[in-house]
Amino acid sequence: MSPSREIARLVEIMAALRMPGSGCSWDIAQTFESIVPYTIEESYEVADAVDRGDRDDLKEELGDLLLQVVFQARIAEEEGSFDFGAVVEAITTKLIRRHPHIFGERRDLTESQVKDLWASIKIAEKSERAAQTDGGAFGKSGSVLAGIPASLPALLRAQKLQSNAATVGFDWNDVGLVLAKIREEADEFERALGDQRAMADEIGDLMFSVVNLARHAGVDAEAALRATNRKFERRFGFVEEALTLRGRSPGAAGLAEMEDLWQAAKMTERTTPEGEPARSLVQARLRESEPQESGSEAAEAVEAARAP
């Protein structure tokens, strides 16, 4: 088969890969359950490419994610449940239904009215689905919290749980109250020190409250933590590189020395172009500071690091 820009060719290739007798044995052996980990992994790789601003990689990762959709749709078609066309129809129907201010009669709505309309449509959809599955009894399937996958990352799921509860008015109306709740949870954790089970419980409450603060600030908690993780890796990499240039290892350095280098890393981020090689940044920063250790041997190590 030749490459193509058409989705139909991708569907055909997937069917060929799954064809008993002539397809790929690995692809044929897969089930919904076996490929879910790959679907989750591809979603994270898409997010990573976006975070890094790598558009070429993003194009490839979006293709990998699209493959997961086509793959699962093919398995469903083989068992007689639905096909890829039904997946496309389902999402186009949902988009049209949830945007009556674009595709229907509800025009000229404010942004706030659009958000309220979206929430009411979602609630109506859940109620209809609950009526079809359990006769309309109010329970998990009919809850405003229904439909939030338990497999989501904990920060993202916490934010979605809070957002859904907020649609029916269960929410703080002042960010100051959220901050007060965080302080309260921190105090409760302090009182729980020494009790492992209680500490775990209080840490969960504290993190849930911080997610709530992020939501009220309009910040995606999951994305914010990913960004902080990358920042920590970048700055600690600076510290490791600086210690290497001094002829030392992190294990041999003291906390004070590493903290000084950490602060140097922060300053470097503010004053140098993004993307400049880490080693040159470290060398430049070392030239501006004196070694933290004393003695001729340590001084010689730093002077060697400063050499071009």
Image (tube, helix red, strand yellow):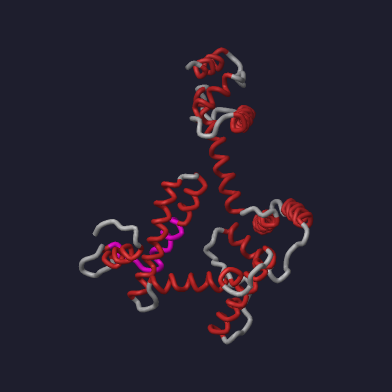
| Residue at position x 21%, y 69% in the image | 21
Instruction: Name the image quarter holding the N terminus.
Output: bottom left
Which is more toward the observer, 196 or 292? 292
Q: Position of residue 237 (x, y in %)?
A: 52, 34
In this rendering, is residue 86 above or below 194?
A: below
Does residue 169 appear to the left or right of 4 in the view shown?
right
Q: Is residue 255 visible?
A: no
| Residue at position x 53%, y 72% in the image | 96
Q: Residue furthest bottom?
A: 135
Q: Position of residue 105 (x, y in %)?
A: 61, 75
Which is more toward the observer, 206 or 70? 70
Q: Main secondary structure of the magenta part?
A: helix
Which is more toward the observer, 3 or 296? 3
Q: Is residue 23 magenta?
A: no
In this rendering, is residue 260 above or below 132?
A: above
Q: Is residue 36 magenta?
A: yes
Does residue 75 appear to the left or right of 202 in the view shown?
left
Q: Residues in magenta?
A: 26-42
In this rendering, is residue 280 above or below 219?
A: above
In this rendering, is residue 153 above or below 290?
A: below
Q: Position of residue 6 (x, y in %)?
A: 34, 61
| Residue at position x 29%, y 56% in the image | 3
Which is more toward the observer, 303 or 215? 215
Q: Residue furthest left?
A: 21
Q: Where, by quadrant of the figure, is residue 203 drawn? A: bottom right
Q: Where, by quadrant of the figure, is residue 35 drawn? A: bottom left
Q: Where, by quadrant of the figure, is residue 180 drawn? A: bottom right
Q: Please state the total of marks drawn on the protein image.
A: 0
Q: Is residue 81 visible?
A: yes
Q: Position of residue 153 (x, y in %)?
A: 55, 58
Does residue 203 appear to the left or right of 9 in the view shown?
right
